[in-house]
């Protein structure tokens, strides 16, 4: 998100950035379930994956309203993108203390 704030106004560069962003994001949703299963107990991973999906949907529903409001107030999208980037950094900071659970080996 911070990269999108400093993109030059050339349409070709914008299309290249959007293409690379889309290609790199395309493999992310498949990894959610695996990451949740690796970091939490098997009895908790299904409900946590449900919470993850719900929170993602909630953010996807609310952020356009917040982003549009910030755009209307400031006249540009920079504040909106910085707000989103800060939110993403807070999300990363909240998961840093989590360590993977030791899995028992099946014999």
Image (tube, rainbow, N blue to C red):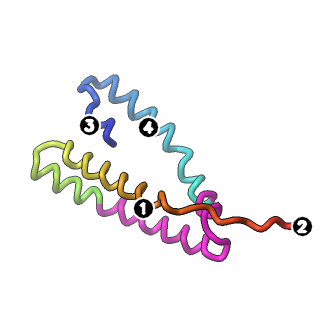
Asked whether the beta carbons under mark 2 and mark 3 sit within 8 Å of each other, the answer is no
The residue carrying mark 2 is 107
Q: Which mark, residue 21?
A: 4
Residue drawn at (67%, 72%) of the image: 42
On the rendered structure, is 96 left or right of 70?
Answer: right
**Front label number (1 vs 4):** 1
Q: Secondary structure at mark 2?
A: loop
**Front label number (4 vs 2):** 2
Residue 41, horizontal then vertical, whole percent = 65, 71
Residue 21 versus residue 35: which sits nearer the camera? 35
Residue 49, horizontal then vertical, whole percent = 55, 67
| Part of the protein shown in magenta | 34-62
The quarter in which the C terminus is drawn is bottom right
The residue carrying mark 1 is 94
Label 4: how many Cα within 10 Å (few below 14, some 14–19, many 20+)? few
The residue carrying mark 3 is 5
Rounded to the nearest whole Å, what is the CA distance between mark 4 and mark 2? Answer: 43 Å
Q: Secondary structure at mark 3?
A: helix
Secondary structure character of the magenta stretch overall:
helix
């Amino acid at each position: 998100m911070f990269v999108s704030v400093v993109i030059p106004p050339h349409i070709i560069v914008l299309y290249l950035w959007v293409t690379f962003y889309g290609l790199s994001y395309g493999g992310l949703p498949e990894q959610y379930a695996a990451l949740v299963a690796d970091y939490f107990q098997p009895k908790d991973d299904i409900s946590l994956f449900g919470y993850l999906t719900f929170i993602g949907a909630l953010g996807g529903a609310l952020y356009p309203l917040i982003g549009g409001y910030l755009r209307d107030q400031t006249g540009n999208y920079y504040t909106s993108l910085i707000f989103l980037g800060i939110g993403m950094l807070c999300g990363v900071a909240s998961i840093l203390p989590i360590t993977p659970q030791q899995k028992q080996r099946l014999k």
